[in-house]
Amino acid sequence: MSFHNPQANIILTGFMGCGKTTVGRLLAAELGRIFIDTDDHIARQQGLSIAQIFAMRGEAVFRQLERELAAELTVPASLVIATGGKMLLDPVNAGLLTQGGVILSLAASPAEILRRIKADKNHMRPLLDGDLSINRIEKLLKERRAGYAAFRQLETDHRDPAEIVRDILQAVYSVTSKKE
Ligand code: S3P
């Protein structure tokens, strides 16, 4: 999908704490688009927080819910979509969302990720439960690095959300002009 289609969705992936939700919400407001956060969508649909879904039903059920949602997000509909940190590391999910838009990955250093996650008291991360440490973040990042590298990546360290929004708009336009 190219951004030439004015309805192409802009989809954000990347590790926990890289700013997908904060930046996605701001980007949507700037463009006057509808914003969807896949974690929020699943939590509302299930009537449970993500942490409760992990604890009561298990990670496999959560991943299945992500796959079901991915299958609903294939149409270009002028959306800004912030995905859960692992959703698009499943190539089937990434393929489905690519049908409707352009995927970008937000990145940050392990130290910055740790700082942001510690500051975000409202958002529980079950995968870091009991071990919110730089070592755990580095380990997970190492496992996932190649997956995120499949997408155009934008660094977010030392940048505020408004600057990242500008970077995204630039990236989205250059992705499309390269395809011409
Ligand atoms: C996860 C990231 C979380 C959420 C779930 C699992 C992951 O989303 O989907 O806790 O495996 O990276 P955020 O990236 O929005 O924190």
Image (cartoon, rainbow, N blue to C red):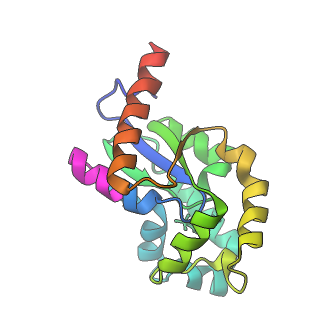
Q: Nearer the viewer, residue 47 or 149?
A: 149
Q: Nearer the viewer, residue 113 or 62?
A: 113
In magenta segment, residue 84: no
Image position, residue 175 (x, y; %): 47, 26
Instruction: Establish if 29 lies above or below 111.
Output: above
Residue 173 visible in the current orientation: yes
> Residue 31's quadrant in the figure?
top left
Toward the front, the furthest residue is 158
Overall secondary structure of the magenta section: helix
Toward the top, the furthest residue is 180
**Quadrant into which the C terminus falls:** top left
Q: Nearer the viewer, residue 17 or 86?
A: 17
Image position, residue 126 (x, y; %): 64, 79
Image position, residue 174 (x, y; %): 43, 25
Horizontal side of 62 relative to 77 (left or right) equals right
Instruction: Establish if 141 lies above or below 43.
Output: above
Task: Count the marks.
Answer: 0
Q: Nearer the viewer, residue 81 or 162?
A: 162
Residue at 23% across / 48% down in the picture? 30
Horizontal side of 58 relative to 31 (left or right) equals right
Toward the left, the furthest residue is 32
Residue at 63% across / 66% down in the picture? 111
Residue at 58% across / 82% down in the picture? 51
Image position, residue 157 (x, y; %): 52, 55
Quadrant containing ligand 1: bottom right
Horizontal side of 149 relative to 162 (left or right) equals right
Q: Which residues are magenta?
A: 25-34
Instruction: Establish if 161 lies above or below 54.
Output: above
